[in-house]
Amino acid sequence: MIQSSTSKSSNRTGLLNNDASRAVILQAVVLLLALFGLWFLFANASENLNRLGMTFGFDFLQVTAGFNISWSLIPYDPSMSYWRVFFVGIVNTLVLSFCVIVVGTIIGTVVGILRLSDNPLVSQLARWYVEIVRNVPLLIQIIFWFTVVFSTLPAPRQSYHLGEWLFLNNRGLYVTTLQSAVSWGWVLLLVAALIIALYGLFRWSKSYYTLSGSRSTGFYIGLLFWALFACWALWFLVNAMTLSVPSLQGFNFSGGAFLPASFGAAFVAMTVYRSAAIAETVRAGMQSIDRGQHEAAFTIGFSRVQSLRLILIPQAIRAIIPPMTNSWLTSVKDSSLAVAIGFPELVSVFMQTSMNQTGRAIEIIFMVMGFYIFISLLISYLLNKYNDSVQYKVR
Amino acid sequence: MNKFTMALAATTTLLAANTYADDNVSTLSAVKDRGYVSCVIGNSFPGFYSLNKAGEWQGMDIDMCRGVASAVFGDASKVKFLPVQWAQSFTSIKSGKGDILSKGMTWTLSRDTQQGLDFLDTYFYDGQGFMVRKDLGVKSVKELKGATVCVLTGTSSELNIADYSRANNLDIRTVVFDDSSVRNTAFFNNNCDALTNDKSGLAAQRSAAPNPSDYVILPETISKEALSFAVKQNDSEWANVVKWTFAAMIAAEEFGVNSQNVEKMRADSQSPVIRRLLGVEGDLNNGLGLPQDWAYQVIKNVGNYGEVYERNVGPNSVLGLDREGTLNALWTHGGLMYAKSFR
């Protein structure tokens, strides 16, 4: 018997017989149960810890870590605290995942489109690439790239090199970098100011042109000033910049920037693996478009590239984004496998080394889980917003 | 009311999820009920724990666990080995999955006080060293300025090297692995200039190298590594069993009792200490909660400490480590192996 929620019926109608209130009550019950469950697990764990004479708390994060981390983008040395170790791990994890996501998405999109090629050789090659890569576990691929490819590069003294600018050996890649006497913030600000000034100038002159039909002399004067400003900026930057060239000193190169071999191996293996998964996503998305769209594009004389760019991909994107989101999330989580080859990402520096030194298993796992959950939610939020923007607009 | 049943089911599952064993039950009774000792080891550390060609575990740590099984059950085979990564060693003991941690674990203050463990006896005194390729021409650790060193995560080596590098201004870069086989591959492929580990471990890794004579172990020892047993904190009864099993192995060596002559000794020996040790007279087993002949079983099945040493790490073993004059010799030979009194 269906009751409308507005009907004020007899006293037989309890709260549970009313749809609206019943939904609220049920949800409250489920929420309470979930909270009880969490409390129960927490209490159980803390009781067991107490029995072992251990306390729950995050004080240990202020303690000096005392161990080395082989590669860090943010300054780190062993006298810093576990907090710092946590952030070093986060930054390393994010850098690796970000590179994998960007390159893997590009390669995956290309391979996915090639799979739909009319040329059987191309489409079969793409197909075999995808099938082989997807069916070998990622961990095995990571270890393969590290032990078979990157560690068999020559030792530092016999590095492959490009002049004196770039060295590749089994420790990693050493590249020449620019070092700036002024802080990078000012450099960026200067470059941004130049670009904005030029853009503003063109905007203004264009609006002037559309109104009056002629170029103003003001525009040329402005351009002259801009050129002078640009020359000064260039001169200033060239004077402020020095090259930092890697050079072999004793066991290792110093100077320049360094990417360890473990990063290379993890990056290549994860990118290849991810690109295969994304290729499948892209292929499925493309095949979801009605065949008539291809033909229509062909009929009005669009080239293959034009029809992809202007007609097919914009429509396929709707079907591609949700599984792509999942792929990106997985990339971040997969980066934890790089621990196997000694890349110092979050799991390696925090969940293994730090956990061993402090014995704070529960707190550390909480923090690591919290980080992964946060990143996952962030990525899906951003991609969902993008997804909403590309959907068909129904007004 | 389908949702209610689901919620109810969820609650009961949750309540059933309290898998922690009741901690008031001592480990000893739990082991007796279970019928075997659960011993936490690592993946492979030749001389201490490794699989032989027949697929059986062998090594010093393995023998120690077999000794405990012999003491409790009179049968050295009543033991199961749990190989875990370094990073999970402590957790496996805390959660009650393992009864003894015996994996070449260094006794340190923080592990003893912050990990929910009690360390018992040191069965092997070791120290951290470095191994390098001969062709580097390095003679001392002090020459490793700026070198890259491979190390295993979660080990005390990882911290010692950071301390040593800071103290001596060496700017050593460590590359951390969580699996010793990947670490060894990296070192033998020349991905690091040096490998650091306890010296006994280095000897083992060197013996497994494709060409052992290409590598040298540098003379310096940069740390104290006392490889010791550990059990769950605050369980004296179980700690006593492990402690005295080990003591029985040392005492047996002192008294000249070994696995060959133990049968004869039990029958003929007139020495009161030996008779007490082998359970012919006295009631030393009562306080331990073990059978009368527990020590006899340990020596018969596993041997005394000297035999265990010879078999696994001695001069004729894969590690080839001399014992005379080292800390691992008996106290009567200038070492630190000393059993407390059996009375």
Image: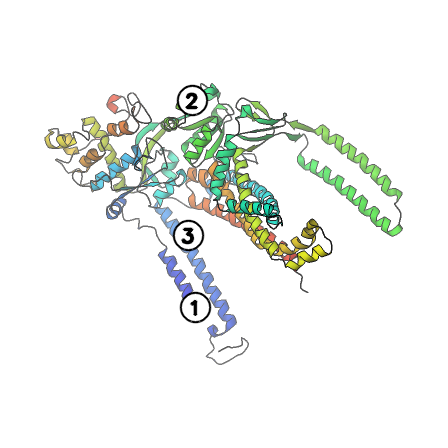
x and y percentages locating residue B266 in the rendered image: 13, 32
Q: CA distance from mark 3 to mark 2?
A: 54 Å
Q: Secondary structure at mark 1?
A: helix
What residue sits right under mark 1 in the picture? B2
Which subunit holds the residue at mark 3?
A
Q: Is residue A366 left or right of residue B293?
A: right
Determine the residue positioned at 59% across, 45% down.
Answer: A121
**Along the horizontal axis of the image, is B17 left or right of A213?**
left
Q: CA distance from mark 3 to mark 1?
A: 29 Å
On the image, the x and y values in percent for residue A54 come to: 38, 44
Which sits in the foreground, A69 or A261?
A261
Task: Say what amino acid the circle numbered 1 marks.
Answer: Asn
- Frontmost residue, B147 versus A275: A275
Q: For numbered disc 3, what is the local secondary structure?
A: helix
Q: Which amino acid lies under the numbered mark 2 shown in the image of this protein?
A: Asp
What residue is disc 3 on? A42
**In this figure, which residue is indicated by the disc labeled 2?**
B214
User: Are the residues under marks 3 and 1 on the same chain?
Assistant: no
- B342 lies above or below A95: above
Q: Residues within 10 Å of mark 2 (few under 14, many from 20)?
A: few
Is residue B93 in view from this perspective?
A: yes
Mark 1 neighbour density, 10 Å: few (under 14) some (14–19) many (20 or more): few
Mark nearer the N terminus (2 vs 1)? 1
Whether residue A57 can be seen here: no
Vertical relation: A350 (above or below) A278: above
Label 3 environment density (alpha carbons within 10 Å; few <14, some 14–19, many ≥20): few
